[in-house]
Image: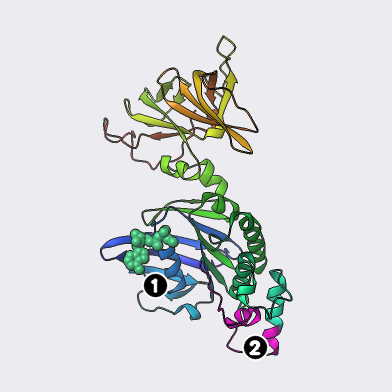
Amino acid sequence: MTPTPRLGLERISKTYAGSPAVRDVSFEVDEGHVMCLLGPSGCGKSTLLRIAAGVERQDSGVVRVDGRVVSGDASHAPPEARGIGLMFQDFALFPHLTVAQNVAFGLGRSLNGARSAVVGQYLERVGLSGYGAKFPHELSGGEQQRVALARALAPRPRVMLMDEPFSGLDQRLRDSVRDETLALLKEEGAAVLLVTHEPEEALRMADRIALMRGGAVAQVGAPYHVYNHPVDRKAAAFFSDVNVIHGEVRARQTDTPFGLFLTPGMVDRADVEIIIRPQHLKIEEDRGAPPPSTMRTGVPARGHVTRARFMGSESLIEVRMDHDGSLLKATVPGAYLPGAGAPLWLSLRREHCFVFPCERQSKVGNPWEDDRDRSGKRPG
Ligand code: ADP
Ligand code: MG
C-alpha cells in the first residue's frame, strides 16, 4: 500500500477579480520530499502556497494534510490548525524578542523548561548554539535566516511551506544556507513545498519540480526529467538559453543542414523546431574539409565566430551560420576563445535535441497526424 501523501492539492483554482491566478492544479508531496513550484513571476506560485497554508482560500478544490481535508467546499481550517510550518522571503523575526524567544514563539507564548530544551536543540541543529540571548539585529542575514528556519521547524510541522526563502540572502551565503536547510528538512522528514523562480535553485533543492505557467502546471517531474525531457520549447527555455533550428516535415522526417531528424506522427509541411542547449553543440575547428558526420552528432554545418566570451567555468561562443545567417550559441568548459571571424563547424549531439511542432503553427493547422498527447520527443 502506498503511504498517504503528507500534502495533497486536488483541482485547486483561484480567481482574483475575474483573472485566474491558479487553474485546476493538483499534486501531492510525500514525507521527506521536496516539491518545488517553479515559474516566472506572476504565474501563481505564491497564491498556491498561500492556499496550501490556509491564509488564502481557493474558489474550488481540496487541500489535504495527511489525508485529512483541511480545506474544501464544506470546511476551511486556519493555518495554525493545519500542522504546517511557514517561511517567507521577508521572514520577519520579532526584533524585540531574543533568538531563543523567537524560536520558542511557535511552541507557545512562554519559555518553560521543556520548551527551552527544544529551543536549544533546534538552535544547535541550525548551528547557532549559544546565540539564544542575542537579538536579531546582532545577527547576519544568514544567521537570521537560520533562526527563522529553527522557528519554523521547532513545532515539528508535518508540512513545510517556503516561499522564496533564500532570495533575501546574498549569493555567497545562499548556496551554503540552501544546502544546510535542505539537509535539515530531509532529517525532519517534513513534506516541503518550496516556491522559487530560479531554475538552479529548483534543480538543486527539489525531488520533484512543478513547472508553472499562467496559473497552471505545465510539467511535473524529477529535476533530471524536467530538464532533459521538456514538454515544449518554453519549458526547455526556462532552464537555459536554447538554440532553435527550424525545419519542415517531409514524409515523417525533417531535413536540416545538421542532418535528418525523424518527426514521426507529424503531417507533411508542418513546421518544426529543433531545440538544443548551448552545452550540447559540438564545435570543431575548420581544417579545410568538413569533419565527418556521425550517428551521434549528425552532419556538421559551418559558421563564423561573431564573439567569444569567458564566463569562468565555461566559455560562450556565438557563431553566425553560413547556410542561413542564424546565430547559434555554444558553451564549452574552460577557456576557449577563438577570434571573431574564425570559421568553425558545429554539430548537434542528437540525443540532446528536442523536436517540437513550431509554436507559431498555422500553415497546416494541427501538426499531428492524430490527437495523441505528445511531449519531449527525441529525434530518431
Ligand atoms: P508568483 O508568486 O508566481 O509570482 P502570485 O501567486 O503572487 O504569482 O500571483 C499570481 C497572479 O495573481 C498575479 O497575476 C497576481 O497579480 C495575482 N494576485 C496575487 N495575489 C493577489 C491578490 N491578493 N489580489 C489580486 N490579485 C492577486
Ligand atoms: Mg511569489
Dot 2, how many residues are within 10 Å of its Cα: few (below 14), some (14-19), or many (20+)?
some
Question: Against 286, is 99 above or below?
Answer: below
Horizontal and vertical percent position of residue 17: 26, 66
Dot 1, how many residues are within 10 Å of its Cα: few (below 14), some (14-19), or many (20+)?
some
Residue 252 figure quarter: top left
Left or right placement of residue 142 versus residue 39 in this view: right
Residue type (three-letter) at the residue carrying disc 2: Leu
Q: Residue 56 — which label?
A: 1
Q: Residue 111 — which label?
A: 2
Q: Nearer the viewer, residue 80 or 68?
A: 80
Question: Which residue is at the far top?
Answer: 288
Horizontal and vertical percent position of residue 106: 57, 81
Residue type (three-letter) at the residue carrying disc 1: Glu
Residue at 30% x, 35% y is 361
Does the magenta-highlighted stretch encompass residue 93?
yes
Count every numbered label the image shows and give the total.
Answer: 2
Q: Which residues are magenta?
A: 90-116
